[in-house]
Amino acid sequence: MGSEVHTLYFIACISNGRSKTFRNILIIFSSFVILLLLLPVLIENEEKMTSKKYTPQEIARLILLCWHGEADKQQMTELEEWLEESADNRSFYESLGARSYQGTEWQEYMKYDSRKDWKRVKVAMKRRKRVPFRYLLPYAALVLIAIGLAWMIKYKNTGKSEQPVSMVETIRPGSSKAQLVLPDGRRVDLEVDRGCQQLKGENFVNDGKQLVYHEQENGKRIQWHTLSVPRGGEYKLVLADGTRVWLNAASELMYPDHFSADQRKVVLKGEAYFEVTKDVKRPFSVVLGDMEVKVLGTSFNVSAYPGVKRQTTLIEGQVAVNWHRQQVVIRPGQQAVETDEGLRVASVNVMNYVGWKEHRFVYENKLLGEVLEDLERWYDVEVFVMHDEIRNLHLTANLPKYENMDKVLEIIEYAACVKFEVKGRTVVVRRD
């Protein structure tokens, strides 16, 4: 897509020129490039979409004008009319948010300043002998024809016949499921066994999606429970103090059935999002092996999967992260990450790290190898990468978490230029 971006950059730079004829031709050229960017996707989805009034070319142009913030009131109205024609139209439009058009290449195009670049072009033009524009028209036409023919040949040969993702069976997304391990060794499947409040002597209620604890009487002996979420699962937990926890796939949390009078401590393996109930007298601690995150009352995400650098991302409040003899304090919008040199604090886009809780996988320049690990855990599959360099590709995308896996893989294929083949619960990744 890089060549199309630079073509759009060229248009942006020179479309402020004073020649009306030149600008008219450039408008036609820009419409063609816009069609080049989006028409394959529109054709792919044309059976799902309906329009009584607009052609795919018009739809593509309206969408990109809207993204670029250059749509006038009439164009915004036209786009809204098309969206209202059917639910499929709106669904298709929203799905484009995850595609590469709004990824790194599109961001590259968006950061160009056409006015500044036009000034540079005018200075360069003054240094050269002017060529009558009418002599350039045949060459411009040839360029347009050549680009058009090349694209049509490519799309004819590959666009229709090639299936985006080779699938044998449908792989559905994960769901609410977990296993509760009680102090006496009993195991309760929370996906199947609902109404667990009937267990004698226990202070929790389960509805198949959320496990809720209640405070115990003072003086009662504290017992430790373990909530284990498998690959392909997620679960919500409300601790006895009211703290809410979202456990991600392949994660485990060990916690007391009620807290003591002076502290609140849990032990995490994997990833979880916490909304901690404020209690000045009882600090809340999350233990991650030899690392500890300590708070009073706040919202934060902790990731501590095996073999991955541990990280704590803060949304609200303030937390202290302790590792060996080092302590760092982070504030909202910051993240503490384990490195070989110690804890490192950096400002981040928190949605990239808590999107999973909001039913999305949000990535910004993320290594594809790390993205594939997320998919392995959520869809409970094994991913084999045939070329090591694929793991080092970067992906910017906003992926729907509850779509079947083939839909998500199609989006990644477009964005990262790779090819997926799925056999059973095994996914093979190759260069496209």
Image (cartoon, grey):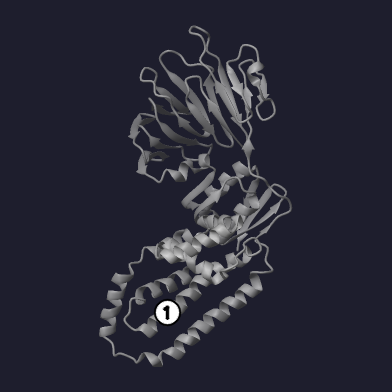
Can you say whether 361 is above or below 17 in the image? above
x and y percent of residue 263 in the render?
A: 42, 17
User: Can residue 393 be seen at all in this image of the molecule?
Assistant: no
Can you say whether 102 is above or below 136 in the image? above
Q: Secondary structure at mark 1?
A: helix
Toward which corner of the image does residue 410 lie, by quadrant? bottom right
| Residue found 62% across the figure and 67% down from its top | 43
Name which residue type carries label 1: Leu
| Residue found 49% across the figure and 28% down from its top | 244
> In the image as oriented, which residue stretches furthest toward the top?
219
Count of marks overlaid on the render: 1
Q: Residues within 10 Å of mark 1 (few under 14, many from 20)?
A: some
x and y percent of residue 127 in the render?
A: 25, 85
**Residue 288 or 349: which is nearer the viewer?**
349
Q: Is residue 8 left or right of residue 182?
A: left
x and y percent of residue 123 in the render?
A: 26, 79
The quarter in which the C terminus is drawn is: bottom right
**Residue 369 or 216: which is nearer the viewer?**
216
Please give the residue where the numbered disc 1 appears in the rendered image: 26
| Residue found 42% across the figure and 28% down from its top | 292
User: Can residue 214 be seen at all in this image of the molecule?
Assistant: yes
Can you say whether 164 is above or below 26 in the image? above
**Residue 285 or 398: which is nearer the viewer?**
398
Q: Is residue 258 left or right of residue 172?
A: left
